[in-house]
Image (spheres, grey):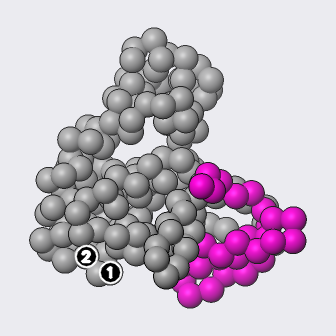
């Protein structure tokens, strides 16, 4: 299993495909639209990967944060939702916006993804709303196709997930911790509350 890849982005293609060169070996992977738009050619980047092995193909899916990868894995755990639909949903907005939409039960947002119908969106909401934690804000979620510079991954949330916390518990542990504190302090306080 390939857990992550760090290398230089050599090519971008097809709206969500990248080739990352790691010591002379090029890894082709599909990434969500926010990650695709947020990376430039020649940049060194780290992608957390999901490696899908099928009878007739092997595919890599890459994410700039561990939270995004875990959200993707939750999406594809739903019956009838494959990796291509998972990437399409993750391409609607950053991982926190997708998580928040599911927590709010916003099936209309999920249904806007290419290849995801109304029934699939409703199944995703039903299956995952209790697994993604509480909403960080209420109301409808907007579809975003570009990443603002302030949409950085939450390193404290990534750290808690790396320590083995499920997404729901990690989100709940960080809920009442001041987001302006340094990452290490946020993780320490979250661990005390968990």
Circles 1 and 2: CB atoms closer than 8 Å: yes
Where's the N terminus, which quadrant? bottom right
Q: Percent x, y for residue 76?
A: 34, 61
Q: Magenta residues?
A: 1-30
In this rendering, the answer to whether 154 lies above or below 53 is above
Q: Which mark is residue 114?
A: 1
As helix, strand or loop, the secondary structure at mark 1 comes to loop
As helix, strand or loop, the secondary structure at mark 2 comes to loop
In this rendering, the answer to whether 42 lies above or below 138 is below
Residue 149 among magenta residues: no
Q: Which mark is residue 116?
A: 2
Viewer can see residue 124: yes
* Residue sitting at x 62%, y 23%: 184
Q: Percent x, y for residue 124?
A: 21, 59
Question: How far is mark 1 from mark 2, CA to CA?
Answer: 6 Å
Locate residue 90: give its quadrant: bottom left
Q: Residues within 10 Å of mark 1 (few under 14, many from 20)?
A: some
Would residue 107 be found to the left or right of residue 43 on screen?
A: left
In this rendering, the answer to whether 71 lies above or below 163 is below
Q: Which mark is residue 82?
A: none
Where's the C terminus, which quadrant? top left
* Residue sitting at x 58%, y 38%: 155
Magenta portion: prevailing SS class: strand
> In the current view of this chain or complex, which residue is farthest to the right?
23
* Residue sitting at x 60%, y 72%: 29
């Amino acid at each position: 299993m390939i857990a992550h890849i760090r290398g230089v982005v050599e090519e971008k293609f097809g709206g969500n495909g990248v080739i990352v060169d790691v010591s002379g070996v090029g890894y082709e992977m599909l990434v969500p639209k926010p990650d695709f738009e947020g990376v430039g050619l020649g940049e060194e980047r780290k992608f957390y990967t999901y490696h899908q092995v099928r009878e007739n193909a092997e595919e890599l899916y890459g994410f700039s944060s561990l939270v995004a990868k875990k959200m993707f894995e939750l999406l594809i755990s739903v019956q009838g939702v494959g990796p291509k639909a998972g990437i399409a949903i993750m391409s609607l907005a950053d991982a926190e916006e997708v998580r928040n939409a599911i927590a709010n039960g916003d099936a209309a947002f999920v249904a806007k993804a290419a290849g995801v119908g109304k029934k699939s969106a409703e199944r995703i909401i039903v299956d995952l709303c209790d697994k993604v934690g509480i909403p960080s804000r209420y109301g409808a979620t907007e579809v975003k196709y570009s990443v603002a510079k302030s949409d950085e991954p939450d390193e404290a949330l990534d750290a808690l997930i790396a320590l083995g916390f499920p997404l729901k518990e990690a989100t709940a542990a960080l809920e009442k911790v001041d987001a302006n504190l340094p990452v290490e302090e946020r993780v320490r306080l979250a661990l005390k509350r968990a």
